[in-house]
Every structure is written in structure tokens, then in C-alpha cells.
Image: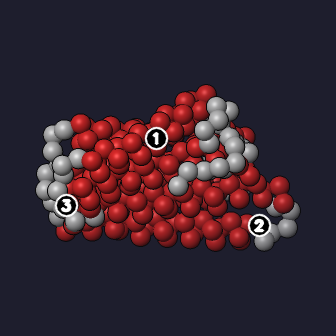
Amino acid sequence: MLRELLSIFRPGNPLQAMADNFAKMIDLTHEQTVKAGEIYFSRTTSPESRSEIRRMDVEVNKLERKIRKQVIQRLSLRGTTQQVPYSLLLMSLVKDVERIGDYAKNLSEVVDFSSDPLPDDEITAELHEFRKFVETAFGSTAEIFSASDREGAIELITAGRGLAQRSDALLSRIARSDYNASLTTSAILGTRYYKRIGAHLLNILSSVVMPLHKLDYYDESSTDIGGSSRSA
């Protein structure tokens, strides 16, 4: 779907307005994720920061609905059959972006369960690595799209598979740790939310290397980036 994806973002394309709204969704969820990470690791929040994350989440949801409406309106016109693949692609991608916003909001709310500082240990260090990967992946995704970088997409998808595996292993380590109930809950939720944010980012990247009917199947264990199963 690389050609179709790039066509959406080309100036003058009839779907440009939808692409602009999609870009806004990406920017908003990126900002949400960064702010949620600051709250999660600092263990502090304020009414203002929480309100800002919720405001962005509402805006992301509105943009998703707007894009859906734009797609329906566009496809109701005569002579738009050739735009069906582009439209289906956007409908799939916007759902992934909307889910990122939900998980970022959830991450910011973990402090409600536990405000105890995260210990300075290997578990917290790995959580910081998950955060770094996810936040960096946002910027890399934009660069990969603009450069038509299929190899870069495959490299990031492969790295994302590794993150998912490490996340599962970390959950086992947390379960065996001597954390109290509050810290255990906090660490497990942080691990799961970062895994899911990363997964949805990589679903978006899969549009660079996969045909439309195989979007989201980046996390197959085979080496050819594709397959018929997906992780939970």
C-alpha cells in the first residue's frame, strides 16, 4: 500500500483534507503520549495536565469521526471508485491512531492507582527504554512515510516485535518481584500500555510494507513481514 499511502499525502489529491486531519491526529497522540509518560514516571499530576490530555483525546475522537464522514461523503460521489483503496486505508489507520490516544490517556491515569515512586532498578530502567522507543517511533514513522523508506519501516517493525517480546518477559519479572501491590499494579499497567501504543504505531507502519488486506499483521513471527496471526 506504499503508493496508495503516499498518494493520499500528495498536494492536490482529492483526499488531501482527510490526510491533513490524519496528520493532526498523529501530532495530537504523539503529544498525548509524551505528556502521559511525564506523568507516569514523575508520579505526579495536576488538574491542568490531566485536563489537557483529556482535551486532546476528545479532539482526536472528533477528528476520527470527521475523517469517517469525509470518506463516506467522498465515496458517495460518482467516479470515485479508484479512491476506494485510499479511503479504506485511512479508515483503518485512523482507528489505530484513536486507540493510541486512549492508551496514552490510560497511561496518565496509572498515577491514580499508585503515586509511589518507581524504584531505581532494572524493571524501571526497561520501562524507560519502552518509553524511549515509543516516543522515538512517532518521529521515525513520519520520516519513513515522507522518504518512502520501506527498509526503514521493516527495521522499525522488527524492533517493535522485539519490544512486544520484552514486554511479555517483563511482566513475568514484575510478577516475581518483591514489589508491593501498588507498585506491581503500576508497573504492569505501564508495561501493557506502552506495548499497546507501540503495537498500534507499528500497525500504522505496516501500511508501508503490506497490502491493504494484511494491514496490522506486522507482528507475525515469520521474517518476511506478513502472515496470518496477530498477537494479543
Residue 114 position in % (x across, y down)? 18, 61
Mark positioned earlier in the residue sequence (3 or 2)? 2
Spatial CA span between label 3 and label 1: 24 Å
Q: Are marks 3 and 2 in contact (CB under 8 Å)?
A: no
Label 3 sits on residue? 182
Which of the two residues, 175 or 204, is positioned nearer the viewer here? 175
Residue at screen point 19% across, 38% down: 121
Q: How is the image coloured?
A: secondary structure
Number of residues whose C-alpha sits closer than 10 Å to that of mark 2, classed few (under 14), some (14–19) or many (20 or more): some
Residue at screen point 51% across, 52% down: 200
Label 2 sits on residue? 75
Where is residue 87, by image quadrant? bottom right
Mark positioned earlier in the residue sequence (1 or 2)? 2
Q: Which mark is residue 165?
A: 1
Q: Amino acid at mark 2?
A: Leu
In terms of secondary structure, where does tag 1 sit? helix
